[in-house]
Image (tube, rainbow, N blue to C red):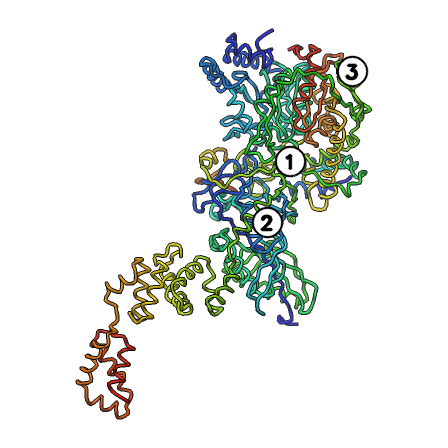
Amino acid sequence: MRLTLEQVRHVAGLARLKLGPEEEQRYQQQLSAILEAMEKLRELDTESVEPTSHSTLSGFLWREDLSRQSLEVEKALANAPEKVGTAFSVPKIIE
Amino acid sequence: MQLFELSMLELASKLASGEVSSVEATRACLRRVAEVDGKVKAFLHVDEKGALAAAEASDARRKGGKPAGPLDGVPVGLKDIFLTEGLPTTCGSRILEGFVAPYDGTVVRLLKEAGLPIVGKLNQDEFAMGSSTEASGFFPTRNPYDLSRTPGGSSGGSAAAVAAGEVFGALGTDTGGSIRQPAALTNLVGLKPTYGRVSRYGVIAFASSLDQVGPLCRTVADAAALLQVIARHDPLDSTSAQLPSPDYLAGLEGGVAGLTLGLPREYFVEGMDQEVERAVRAAAEELRRLGAKVVDTSLPHTRYALATYYLIAPAEASSNLARYDGIRYGLRAADAKGLRELYALTRERGFGPEVKRRIMLGTYALSAGYYEAYYLKAQKVRTLIRRDFEQAFKQVDAIISPTSPVAAFKLGEKVDDPLAMYLMDVFTLPCNLAGLPGMSLPCGFTASGLPIGLQVLGRPYDEARVLRVGRAFEREHDFAKRRPPL
Amino acid sequence: MSASDFQPVIGLEVHAQLLTRSKIFCSCSTEFGAPPNHHTCPVCLGLPGVLPVLNRRVVEMAVLTGLALGCEIQRRSVWSRKNYFYPDLPKGYQITQYDQPICEQGRLLIDGEGGERAIRIRRVHMEEDAGKSVHDPVRGISLVDLNRAGVPLLEIVSEPDLRSPEEAAEYMRSLRDLLVYLGVNDGNLEEGSLRCDANVSVMPKGSAQLGTRTELKNLNSYRFLQKAIELEIARQVLVLESGGKVEQETRLFDAERGETRSMRSKEEAHDYRYFPEPDLPPLVLDEGLVEAQAKALPELPRAKLERFRTQYGLPAYDAKLLTSERPLADYFEAVAAGYRDYKKLSNWFLGELLRLLKEQPTPIAALKIGPGHFAALLSSVDRGEISAGAGKEVLAEMFRTGAAPQTVIAERGLAQVSDQSAIEALVDEVLAKNPSEAEKYRAGKRQVFGFFVGQVMKAMKGKANPQVVNELLRKKLGG
């Protein structure tokens, strides 16, 4: 196994996913198998290769510093599951 | 031939001559949806009212002698990944169930401005992660050529709807093959333009450096015409190409005489379907007969593309999908005790297994201690893959290959084996890693009547030549005229 | 070992909101004080499908600040995503600059304990601000307002070059003054448009090995900054003296309790999973932009201070106060163009003008006193046309109404009588009325001189020029 159960739990925590015990084991297996396949990349010497993080071949796009009418607040809140006044409501942050 | 079977451009000429109205064409689509979508299950949402209102407006413009463009009045469908103001937009995910988009994405605005009625929103793999539409949070879509099989994915709903005659064309997105592979499996033309050619604003992000919008149509000319509507610079997308788009229809009939086409030897691999290989080699012969010079070419890092892709795409996705937290929109676990649980339960319930798998994989690849070994390594190999193409395109004008290693597979066949499913993208995803334009077009059928796709890849921003190669092949055959036995 | 055996080592991370009209990646207003979520749009709400487009002004301000701090301006810098979950972070990541910031390796000169010190600046980078959460403990909920989400920030990170809490506060003041000078920040710590975190460690004096540092948050005034660092140094020294180890952690300053306390939570250690932001290509600066900012660079506070000392011959104390705010300095120079006794002018500024400004807070730009009027008033005092006391009264009136000094003097009848003959007549009269006092004076009782001055002034209703009165009295009394 490439991944321990602890690692699976740690990653799930970082990603804010709650996994049941069965799911943890399934992901441990599947992710380990996938990572195993990814090991193939180690064959390549990339010491002097620059990474490619963007596909864009085009120039940089700017926006001028002009402020304009924002979205109407009703629309901004229309999909909110819970709100108080015009604020989004969440369970208290500091526990 | 029935009205719903026409190509977009055939319909456009009938609309122009007044032989058919947009309302009639739209009603034909709606009737067809009512007739077959119970079996095909391509639609997540049908917007009958909106489509008919747009069709009426189109007919009024036409009557006034002022059509908005060549495709004014031609009804189309949209993958549910596009934000459409006032309509549900779920991206195939339960986490966005009930979400109504408060704005139109750029391509949606462009379609509306060009007068194309939008019949509805089409099914897809959740957040575009999948190759069969089985990862939809709602239901799988079926292949109109064989309802027990997948139409491919992730734009499977878009492909199935066009193939089944429910819409005349559709837009999909392609991150690793999600337009081309379903097009190949449903006897359609599917084009992924160069990265940056079409705006991503208002397209729900899967992997931002790979995602690109493109058309799924019945003919190459339709794909060219639909691309014409959406390919333009967008000041709302910093990665949008600041280049004018050529007239994609103008050179379409130019043929392949004098062009050099490359057959990459790495794309004909052990274990690929023999019928697929035969059909693609036959297509290459055909193109040679039509005047192209067909040569062997090599893309040596092809075998690393899959691993590269399945590190980069999940890494970007793990970040892109962090916004689905149950606070501002979408599903919320109302019973959660405390904030921490709100996140965990909302995301646990809202995301399906494939999405969670990729979020986990991507989070891991970016996490402390693994970034260099996985994410950064993949970005470096990506450079090597791009260089392969740059080298190849010094010798050839376009590359031809199979689109998918197999024809449409059975629903359920690969759902429990993520790696086998990932292999479905093996020929399509290098093109995304390199940001190049790629197209799939019909090149035959298996003995059991399943469509086979031919892939054409081009240089950056060279969609026109990709289309021209495809058209040269298409006009020699009647594949595009075939319709599924629904 | 005792506290005096330890050397504190301090570095500051300062977040400054930039004074742009619109947010960094969308066109929403940055204006402060709107009701919750009224300055939001799909982009800063983090709706599905949105993309960032960079505000050019933000880059200009970053370059200007970098130049003022003597940084190397990077012609290519990279945007990154910093991933973490928090309700006021709508996308689940912050767009920031990480391993390739726009400015590197600068310095800020401050008045340290042993004179002028150059504090090295490690980096300056651009990023987006988060929204705000307000906690309602009664209902057990927090309310999220995203008006601030996407407001542009500059993060300015110093090297750990500061050696005392006082120095840290002085650095913060100097940096604030600089940013305000540049017009990129409003300098308001209380409203949070300038925020500060401190990295603090201690090491035995003479050691070259840095101690383990802690990060202090919530230092929203100079006083808190200084206090929190003092407390933290004392805490760390205590830990070390009792044989313990300082743990690397984030600590929150609690002003009410006067302590710093650990923010350690049960959650896994921070792992922000930075990676290059795919939605924004690397930022490549054109030389034109950098050159334009170099041209726009104003005279900086310290250079101005130096010039005030040499050009106007002012003491360092005066020069520092006068140059603390660019508008005040500019105003001083405008008045000085018409009035040559600079030290006296400085006294009037630091005494009367600052008092008036304190009584009725007014931005210098909105000051009603024309520089020419100010200069004319002081000249009147010098010429003896009015007394210094009356001059203050006139200045106060000018401050209120903007009237010319001559008008105020005339309206209020404040002009002094310097006319020799009119005063002489009165002096004669007073002497004639008080012959015995005159005798006493002549006999050597010099104290009665004041009595005569008083009598004359009384007769003149206080408007006689005291100098003239003195001279005449001395002449008439003889001796």
C455 w.r.t. C446: above or below: above
Whether labels 3 and 1 share one chain: yes
Label 2 belongs to which residue?
C125
What separation in Å lies between label 3 and label 1 (alpha carbons)? 40 Å
What separation in Å lies between label 1 and label 2 (alpha carbons)? 26 Å
Which residue is pictured at 72% across the width and 17% down the height?
A: B256
Residue C209, percent from left and from top: 70, 63
Check whether the beta carbons of the residues at disc 2 and disc 3 lie within 8 A of each other: no
Where residue B317 is drawn, which disc sits there? 1
Residue B464, percent from left and from top: 65, 22
Label 1 environment density (alpha carbons within 10 Å; few <14, some 14–19, many ≥20): many
Label 3 belongs to which residue?
B285
Whether labels 2 and 3 share one chain: no
Quick one: quadrant of the N terminus of chain A? top right
**Element at badge 3?**
helix
- Hey, what amino acid is under mark 2? His
What separation in Å lies between label 2 and label 3 (alpha carbons)? 57 Å
User: Mark 3 or 1, which is nearer the eye?
Assistant: 3
